[in-house]
Image (spheres, rainbow, N blue to C red):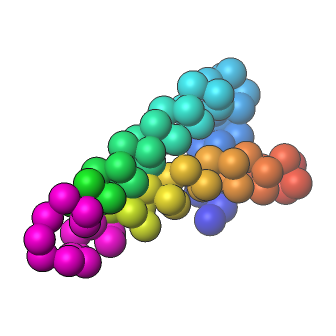
Amino acid sequence: MDEALEVVDVLADSGLEGAITWLLRLIGLVAVLAGLGLWLLTDAGLLVLPAVLIVVGLVLLVAPSILLALSELAG
């Protein structure tokens, strides 16, 4: 966890935190939409791959905000 906070601190110092945050959120949104599309548009029901895509997408949507908040509290 310390390494992730150090990376966030370096990005914050360089001024790229906003771009990286939105890039991760965009990738997360695409992963959630892909997972939902696989789940809803196939006849197999709930599969492992769509579930993993949805969970990873949700983590990518939330993780940048949490990491930035933790880095501000820690430093």
Residue at 79% across / 51% down in the picture? Answer: 69
Return the x and y of residue 70 as percentages of the image width and height. Answer: 78, 56
Residue at 68% across / 21% down in the picture? Answer: 15
Q: Residue furthest left?
A: 43
Q: How many marks?
A: 0
Query: In the rendered image, is residue 27 in sight?
Result: yes
Return the residue nearer the eye: 24 or 67: 24
Return the x and y of residue 54 as percentages of the image width and height. Answer: 39, 63
Query: In the rendered image, is residue 6 in sight?
Result: no
Q: In the figure, is residue 29 to the left or right of 42?
A: right
Quarter holding residue 29: top left
Q: In the figure, is residue 59 to the left or right of 50?
A: right
Residue at 60% across / 55% down in the picture? Answer: 63
Q: In the figure, is residue 11 to the left or right of 13?
A: left
Return the residue nearer the eye: 52 or 33: 33
The residue segment tinted magenta is 39-52
Q: In the figure, is residue 19 to the left or right of 28?
A: right
Return the residue nearer the eye: 2 or 33: 33
Residue at 69% across / 48% down in the picture? Answer: 65
Q: Residue furthest top?
A: 15
**In magenta segment, residue 29:** no
Q: Is residue 16 above or below residue 25?
A: above
Return the x and y of residue 43 as percentages of the image width and height. Answer: 11, 71
Q: Is residue 74 above or below residue 11?
A: below
Return the x and y of residue 1 as percentages of the image width and height. Answer: 62, 65
Quarter holding residue 4: bottom right
